[in-house]
Image (cartoon, rainbow, N blue to C red):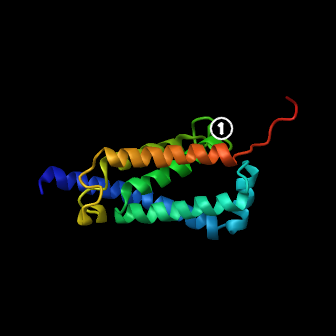
Amino acid sequence: MSNAEIVTSVGLLAVRWAVGIVFIAHGYNHIFGGGKIAGTASWFAGLGMRPGWLHAWTASLTELGAGVLLVLGLLTPLASAGVIGTMVVALVTNHLRNGFFIFRPGEGYEYVVTLIAVGFGLGCVGSGRFSLDHAIGLFDPPNVTGLVIAAAAGFGGAALLLLTSWRPERDRAN
């Protein structure tokens, strides 16, 4: 393995672990933190995701699963699709209307857009040499298949979910 491959793989490992740990923590918090899964379900319903309990569980388990897969470097394009999909739904249902900066009231979209981009990037370039994907020869070397899986399942899954389940309250004055 060349120095460039080692450095690239260490960089990918750091990015995978950072996003993976964030996603594990986020999914865990949705289920066990604060208002627990019931509070998360109520919040999702308040955003217009119907039924709230189904989307709370779907998002939370997707976050946990995608996070674990990223940490392991296993099925990286599918894990990336989980990151993309959950963050696109969060972007559309909650963050987009609040402006760019995360510190704005209601939280802006800079954070979720960054995670979408990182998820897509990992789906494209793969998990690197220090991963289970590399060890078992799955999605390694990176190729267009990872890009297609990450984009189709991530963006396509989010679009399908929003089209079928998002029913935001409409302003009755209009």
Give percent across and percent down for residue 63. Answer: 52, 60
- Residue 118 spot, x, y in % from top left: 41, 46
Q: Residue at x 57, y 67 (%)?
A: 28
Residue 96 or residue 122, whichever sits in front: 122
- Left or right: where 70 falls relative to 97: left
Determine which quarter of the picture holds residue 104. top right
Which residue has dot 1 on it? 98
In what quadrant of the picture does the C terminus appear?
top right
Determine whether, in the image, residue 117 is placed left or right of residue 32: left
Where does the image place residue 54, in percent across and percent down from the top left? Answer: 68, 61
Q: Is residue 66 left or right of residue 97?
A: left
Depth order, front residue of 171/133: 133
Q: Within the image, what quadrant is residue 79 found in?
A: bottom left
Which of these two is toward me, 102 or 120? 120
Q: Amino acid at mark 1?
A: Asn
Considering the image in quadrants, where does the N terminus appear?
bottom left
Label 1: how many residues lie within 10 Å, few (<14), some (14-19) or many (20+)?
A: some
Which residue is rendered at x = 37% and y = 60% of the image? Answer: 75
Q: Tag 1, which secondary structure?
A: helix
- Reply above or below: 55 against 172: below
